[in-house]
């Protein structure tokens, strides 16, 4: 009922005119944000998804005994996203706190790839591989949420 | 209410610390620094901890969102040892054990942060109410 509300004298339901205007203002707002920022948000959420999948692959190794190679190789499949987010964040002129998080995420990811190789010399440091994974997950999700908020605020401002 | 919220926030941060320690103990087992006993034993201890958080949440009187997150945390924590126990009957399901650990960690982090904010809010509210109730001479010596 609310979707077809009319005011007196209107020939068309109000929602038709409104939705077209909404689409136009939305398109304007999206253009104003720019592809770099949208790519950053998409990349940040993709990174979160890859981290979750990566942790599932550990589970497959431990409980299904598929071997650690799939977990190791997948890190090289999505690892390029971390430096890419730093570069896109710079190009998109994201707020400094978002860019800082992306740099820290890159550092933690680099550390993460080194930690397992310390197993023979520093086994306790190697064991911190799992805790560092938690830190990467927390940072990745914070980055994704904060960058989404930045775009949402701009989207709302662009539509006004 | 303020004391209740402070107690809850302290317990929530303690639980988060326990989750991080538990993940480290998983690393100890995975990298063969030690056995899995410590991870298993702490897991059973952490599994019942959300019940204490639920009890502490009653006097703290949080908003619906925080209570919802706490219920989600309780369910995810209860499910966690069951996932590991399913290794022989349903190993693929058991493989979600570390993924669910991420969920437990994230929910514990959110609950601890929101509880701390609520405790701070209650403290500010109490100090504002105290200033409003105090006579002007007491406020300005």
Image: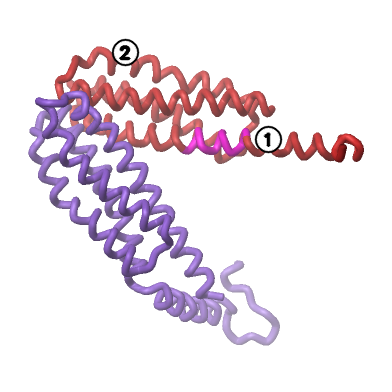
Q: Is residue A65 magenta?
A: no
Q: Colour of chain B?
A: red
| Label 1: chain letter | B
Q: Secondary structure at mark 1?
A: helix
Q: Nearer the viewer, mark 2 or mark 1?
A: 1
What residue lies at 49% left-to-right and 78% top-to-bottom?
A25
Q: Position of residue A93 (x, y in %)?
A: 38, 68
What residue lies at 29% left-to-right and 32% top-to-bottom?
A131
The answer to which of B131 and B22 lies nearer the viewer is B131
Q: Secondary structure at mark 2?
A: helix
Q: Position of residue A102 (x, y in %)?
A: 32, 54
Q: Quadrant of residue B122?
A: top right
State whether residue B122 is above or below residue B34. below
Chain given the colour purple: A
Q: Earlier in the sequence, mark 2 or mark 1?
A: 2
Q: Quadrant of residue A60?
A: top left
Q: Are marks 2 and 1 on the same chain?
A: yes
Q: Is residue B72 visible?
A: yes
* Mark 2: few/some/many CA within 10 Å (<14, 14-19, 20+): few
> What range is drawn magenta here?
B110-119
Q: Read off the residue under disc 2.
A: B41
The N terminus of chain A lies in quadrant: bottom right
* Mark 1: few/some/many CA within 10 Å (<14, 14-19, 20+): some
Q: Is residue B133 visible?
A: no
């Amino acid at each position: 009922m609310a979707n077809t509300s009319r005011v007196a004298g209107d020939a068309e339901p109000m929602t038709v005119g409104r939705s077209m205007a909404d689409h136009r203002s939305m398109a304007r707002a999206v253009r104003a944000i720019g592809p770099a920022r949208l790519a950053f948000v998409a990349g940040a959420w993709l990174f979160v998804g890859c981290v979750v999948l990566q942790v599932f692959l550990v589970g497959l190794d431990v409980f299904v005994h598929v071997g650690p190679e799939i977990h190791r190789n997948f890190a090289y499949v999505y690892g390029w996203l971390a430096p890419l987010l730093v570069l896109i964040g710079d190009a998109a002129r994201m707020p400094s706190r978002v860019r800082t998080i992306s740099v820290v995420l890159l550092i933690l990811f680099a550390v993460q790839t080194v930690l397992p190789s310390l197993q023979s010399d520093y086994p306790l440091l190697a064991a911190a591989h799992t805790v560092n994974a938690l830190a990467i997950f927390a940072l990745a999700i914070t980055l994704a949420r904060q960058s989404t908020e930045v775009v949402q605020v701009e989207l709302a401002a662009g539509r006004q | 209410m303020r004391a209740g919220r402070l107690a809850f926030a302290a317990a929530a941060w303690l639980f988060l610390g326990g989750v991080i320690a538990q993940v480290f103990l998983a690393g100890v087992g995975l990298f063969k620094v030690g056995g899995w006993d410590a991870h298993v034993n702490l897991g059973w201890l952490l599994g019942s901890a959300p019940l204490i958080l639920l009890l502490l949440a009653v006097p703290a009187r949080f908003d619906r969102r925080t209570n919802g997150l706490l219920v989600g945390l309780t369910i995810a924590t209860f499910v966690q040892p069951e996932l590991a126990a399913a290794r022989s009957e349903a190993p693929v399901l058991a493989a979600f054990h570390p993924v669910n650990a991420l969920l437990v960690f994230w929910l514990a982090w959110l609950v601890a942060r929101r509880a701390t904010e609520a405790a701070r809010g209650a403290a500010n509210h109490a100090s504002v109410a105290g200033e409003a109730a105090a006579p002007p001479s007491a406020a300005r010596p």
